[in-house]
Amino acid sequence: MGRQVEITKLSSRGQVVIPKDIRRQLGWETGDHMAVEVRGDTVVLRRLLLEEYPEEPARVSLVK
């Protein structure tokens, strides 16, 4: 996968729009759950497949 850079803005509610082309490329769809991780000054966002956590409640915290 080549490096693709898009520009977006943080809303007053803390929301960021992931551009449509990137969502399509990753196969992300409306309603997908996301894991958000902080690594230094970088935020890593990845799709979280809840079927991998059948025993867990719908709200999963990955904070250490």
Image: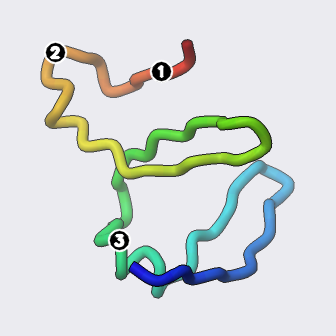
**C-beta proximity under 8 Å, tags 1 and 3:** no
- Residue 55 is marked as 2
Residue that carries the numbered disc 1 in the rendered image: 61
Provide residue 49's location: percent of width, then percent of height.
Answer: 25, 43
- Residue 3 is marked as none
| Secondary structure category for the residue under label 1 | loop
Packing grade of label 1 (10 A; few <14, some 14-19, many >=20) is few
Q: Name the residue: 74% across, 75% down.
A: 8
Residue type highlighted by circle 1: Ser
Residue that carries the numbered disc 3 in the rendered image: 26
| Secondary structure category for the residue under label 3 | helix
- N-terminal-most mark, 1 or 3: 3
Q: For the N terminus, which image quadrant?
A: bottom left
Residue type highlighted by circle 2: Glu
**Quarter location, residue 15:** bottom right
**C-beta proximity under 8 Å, tags 2 and 3:** no
Residue type highlighted by circle 3: Leu
- N-terminal-most mark, 2 or 1: 2
Packing grade of label 3 (10 A; few <14, some 14-19, many >=20) is few
Between marks 2 and 3, how big is the CA–CA gap? Answer: 26 Å
In the displayed image of the protein, which residue is found farthest to the front? 2
Using residue 39 as the reference point, say whether residue 9 is left or right of it: right
- Is residue 3 shown above or below 42? below
Using residue 57 as the reference point, say whether residue 52 is left or right of it: left
| Secondary structure category for the residue under label 2 | loop
Provide residue 45's location: percent of width, then percent of height.
Answer: 52, 50
